[in-house]
Amino acid sequence: MTDPQVALMMLGLFIVMVFLGFPIAFTLMAMGIGFGYYAYFEPGRMWRAFNRLDETASWWESTRLWFEGLLNNRIFDLFINQTYTVMSNEVLTAIPLFLFMGYIIERANIVGKLFGTLNIAARNVPGSMGVAALITCALFATATGIVGAVVTLMGLLALPQMLKARYSASFASGIICAGGTLGILIPPSIMLIVYAAASGVSIVRLYAAALLPGLLLVGLYLVYVIGRAILQPSVAPKPTAEDVPDVPMGKLLYMILTSFLPLAFLILAVLGSILFGLATPTEAAAIGALGGIVLAVIYRAMTWERLRESTYLTVRTTAMVCWLFVGSYVFSSVFSYLGGEHVIAEFVTSLSLEPWQFLILAQLIIFLLGWPLEWSEIIIIFVPIFLPLLPLFGIDPLFFGILVALNLQTSFLTPPMAMSAYYLKGIAPADVKLTDIFRGTMPFVMMVFLSMAVMYLFPQIVFHLPEQIYGTR
């Protein structure tokens, strides 16, 4: 068996292991080390230790020399070096800080007040409660980037009120699920940080590039919600005074000042400091984490227990991402050394695809991978397989990254593994069926595909802000 064939077997075996439910990060490491031991095997290195064995050696010395010989393989040097590379990656340092900001804000009771204020402010807009829920989801998702937290909390806050206001269960569920996933696209997005670390693309350019596509997607969601409320009023009836009280303008402005502006200011301060070069992403993330604590204190929601929970969840999620990077780096290094990337490049080149055909193929594969896998695994493990092919088709990795970020919205919304739907089902009333939630998310999936098509037809949506702020490369 040739080395490229071994590489393809390595990739196929990994996919089988994923579907069998093995932990992905440790499966990557185990397979990388196992196949790497074969790839870097040098009998001479191993026998140098064995040659020091003699009859007078003690049992302990003999055992030590045997282990020294067996472990005298470059794959272990590679594993240590790749682990150090991940630990010293300055881009990844921003992840725990942004996560900590998100978990603190989640526990500060800001979202409930924000939804209540927007609900009152939008009461005369068709589908007002859905509009308020969607905007709240977008802001909260942007501040946290944690899909499960956004969907769960908004499901507890907004879904009961929407159902009480006689909203269709599927319509209300779709709004919350779709809105809750926006944080992986709209800056400051943790997903974009991970893509930047995997691809080498500047994170500040990625943030600038993602801003307009993110707003485009939010706009399409709002157009759908308002349009359907106009065309089919039964799914989103106009709220009564019991559902949403009429508040005097002066009091409404005060509510906006105390609930909406602090969170919006924090997000804009963090994002603006990054985009305009006032701070690195890591420094801005630190400012955001401190700002989250200040907001929690102002809202009298900061307790030792909440601080401890936020710290624990931050460490747990960061460790998962970093171990995925370590495993992916080792796996991809061995896969490339065995010639796997070359085989894939030759195969794709032999198809004689046009750039748009390659983009459709790549996005279709990523879309299908979103069924069994989470976004972090797709970005860290599978997207790097496509990155070396981009120059062959003249595709900018910045543009490709934003397309992937849009595409990954669907991984949370489409069955069989639509995690947003399962998060919501876990806290929804018993009469809200999973089929209702899936039916509600499908129109939003169509909006994602529409936004991808618009972005492909008008690529300046991606490139305009990076070029205006940082110039062309």
Image (cartoon, rainbow, N blue to C red):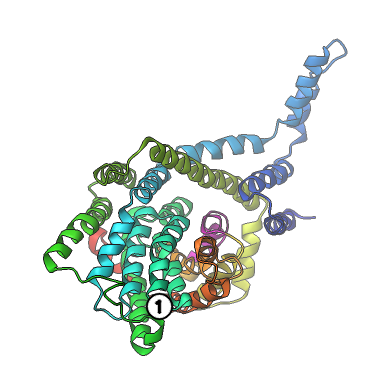
- x, y percent for residue 107: 37, 48
In the image, 55: left or right of 216? right
State the residue at coordinates (49%, 70%).
Answer: 393
Q: Specify the farthest residue to the left.
A: 250
Q: Is residue 11 visible?
A: yes
Q: Residue at x 61, y 34 (%)?
A: 77
Q: Quadrant of residue 104?
A: top left
The magenta segment is 374-391
The residue at which mark 1 appears reads as 166
Residue 153 is situated, as x and y percent measured from the top left of the image, at 42, 58
Task: Report whether residue 403 is seen.
Answer: no
Q: Quick one: 253 or 242, which is closer to the camera?
A: 242
User: Nearest the camera: 89 or 414?
Assistant: 414
- The question of residue 388 being in magenta is answered with yes
Q: Main secondary structure of the magenta part?
A: helix
Identify which amino acid the numbered label 1 is placed on.
Arg
Q: Which residue sits at x=66%, y=55%?
A: 339
State the residue lying farthest toward the front.
Answer: 242
